[in-house]
Image: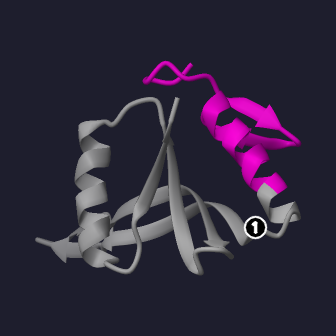
Amino acid sequence: MSKYGNKKVVVDGEEFDSQLEANRWYELKLLQRAKQIKDLRRQIRFELQPSYKKNGKTIQSINYIADFVYYDVNKKKFIVEDTKGYKTETYKLKKKIFEYKYPELEITEIFE
């Protein structure tokens, strides 16, 4: 069990953070086989702020990790997806920074 109450799930040898995420992966794989989407990838890291040094100490970068990224053939654009049980305050903040830094992209949220 994670701190948010979801259970890790293993499907086809791949670990997912929740059953919702595993189910969505399965749906996206079907869409890719049907050639509705392409270039399906998971756990893609987007840097929101690079690491830096202050007073001799390295401060870690801030990243947003998308559950899925793929190209929607019909919409002719890349889609960034995140499966959510609910929105944490950290997620809300990272989403705002993501939208500012990557204005050509938006996060599609898939809820339980």
Snapshot quadrant of residue 90: top left
| 26 horizontally vs 5: left or right | right
Q: In which quarter of the image is the N terminus?
A: top right
In this orientation, which residue lies closer to the viewer: 49 or 54? Answer: 49
| 38 horizontally vs 47: left or right | right
**Residue at (65, 74) in percent of width and height:** 74
| Disc 1: which residue | 36
Task: Tell whether position 9 is magenta.
Answer: yes
| 32 horizontally vs 8: left or right | right
Snapshot quadrant of residue 13: top right
Q: Is mark 1 on a helix, strand or loop?
A: loop
User: How far from the left and from the top, in percent, is residue 22?
Assistant: 71, 38
In this orientation, which residue lies closer to the viewer: 2 or 39? Answer: 39
Magenta span of residues: 1-30
**Residue at (29, 68) in percent of width and height:** 99
User: How far from the left and from the top, in percent, is residue 49?
Assistant: 28, 71
In this orientation, which residue lies closer to the viewer: 70 or 3? Answer: 70
Quick check: 95 above or below 104?
above
Residue farthest toward the front in the current orientation of the protein: 74
Identify which amino acid the numbered label 1 is placed on. Gln
Residue 45: tell me if it is visible. Answer: yes
Quick check: 31 above or below 9?
below
Task: Tell whether position 91 is magenta.
Answer: no
**Residue at (40, 59) in percent of width and height:** 64
User: How far from the left and from the top, in percent, is residue 29?
Assistant: 80, 55
Residue 59: tell me if it is visible. Answer: no
In this orientation, which residue lies closer to the viewer: 94 or 37? Answer: 37
User: How far from the left and from the top, in percent, is residue 102?
Assistant: 34, 77
